[in-house]
Image (cartoon, helix red, strand yellow):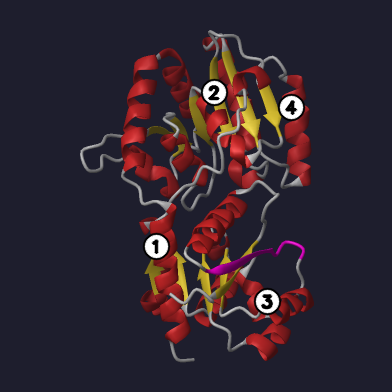
Amino acid sequence: MNSALRVIILTPTGLPNLTGNAVTAERWRIALSREGVVVRVIETQSLDPAGLIRILEHFRPHIVHAHHISRAGALMLDPRVVQKYGHLPLVVSPGGTDVNLHMRKETGMTLIGETCRAARAVIVQSPEIARILEELLPDLKGRIAAAPKSFLWFGTDPFDLRTSAGCRPQDILFFMPAGIRPVKGNLECLLAMEAAQTACPGLRVVFAGPALDAGYAGRFRKEIQRMASLATWIPSIPLPAMFSAYQGADVVLNHSISEGFSNALLEAMAAGRPVLASDIPGNRWLSEDKDGIGPCGCLFNPGKPGDFIRKINHLFHDPAIRERLAANGRLRAATWPGPAEEARRLLSIYAAAIETPV
């Protein structure tokens, strides 16, 4: 594609905020830039329509890619933006909360439907999200475009996760990299880990991620201070040190009630770490046999706290199953497309959107 192509990526949060959306947008920015594209990532959480118009006037993009429909793409529907830039090609990529939470409510469904209809393509990176969109918005089936999802290590800086968590050599360390907010279930995970501690002497858990919901994070902070012998919270691990951080963990946790296609799960597998994740649609691929490779993680029923505790106990006491899941993850990760393949598919979607008649 033309090296002069100019792309704006709208995302609820961008770097230096360490969120899944920010990491995805930065991976795309780097990979697209390597293909000769001029890319600017714009954080929308504090952006108003007038600010977006100023950015569009200055940058003059050929296309806008809104990553997360309700918290980024909907900004393009503001009448002031439409009046000046309604002709500008728009593509959107839904977040997990778009399809699993917002689309289950009437107001969210209306907003997401309107935004998708204003877009020339809806980019999906998991079959589950494509299935949900086709089911709930069948008139948009022809606009859904699949793109592979990759992962990217942003550096090899050292980070001693075990020392940060106060681990002894014999301790088993569980690691939950996720921003602190209700959809991620950080607090519920912490309380369940406390319940598992009696049967698992030497259990430690470290949470890593920024406070994204003030009230929820306040309750989480209070509980984690009470459980200092069990748990540690690290609000920020630099992106270049994440590979090293994963290497220090024995098991990676996901306690979410909603996921699209989690960066953290891909990274855990690529780092050769077993996963324990909630049994929700966006996570179920972990337990599948694929291409002769067995499950890469264990799933627990999020509606039954006792099931999570049983799975913690199982993984804590069985190093053989931890290694088997980790080995499967490494094999699966070796088959994934790289960032360049992901970027080239995005570029083909962008090209088709630009050429689509208004």
| Residue 223: numbered disc | 4
Q: Quadrant of the N terminus?
A: bottom left
Image position of 76 (left or right of 196) = right
Task: Establish if 326 lies above or below 358.
Answer: above
Residue at mark 3: 59
Q: Quadrant of residue 4?
A: bottom right
Q: Is 317 within the magenta?
A: no
User: Which residue of the protein is positioned furthest toward the left in this rendering?
Assistant: 292
Where's residue 189, x and y in %?
59, 31
Q: Quadrant of residue 229?
A: top right
Q: Are marks 4 and 2 in contact (CB under 8 Å)?
A: no
Q: Earlier in the sequence, mark 2 or mark 3?
A: 3
Q: Are marks 2 and 1 in contact (CB under 8 Å)?
A: no
Residue at mark 1: 147
Bounds of the magenta segment: 37-46
The kind of residue tagged 3 is Phe
| Residue 248: numbered disc | 2
Where's residue 257, x and y in %?
54, 45
Q: Are marks 3 and 1 in contact (CB under 8 Å)?
A: no
Secondary structure at badge 3 equals helix
Q: Earlier in the sequence, mark 4 or mark 3?
A: 3
Secondary structure at badge 2 equals loop
Q: Earlier in the sequence, mark 4 or mark 2?
A: 4
Relative depth, front residue between 216 and 159: 159
User: Callout 4 environment at 10 Å: few (<14), some (14 to 19), or many (20+)?
Assistant: some
Relative depth, front residue between 31 and 71: 31
Residue at horizontal 27 percent and vertical 34 percent from the top: 294
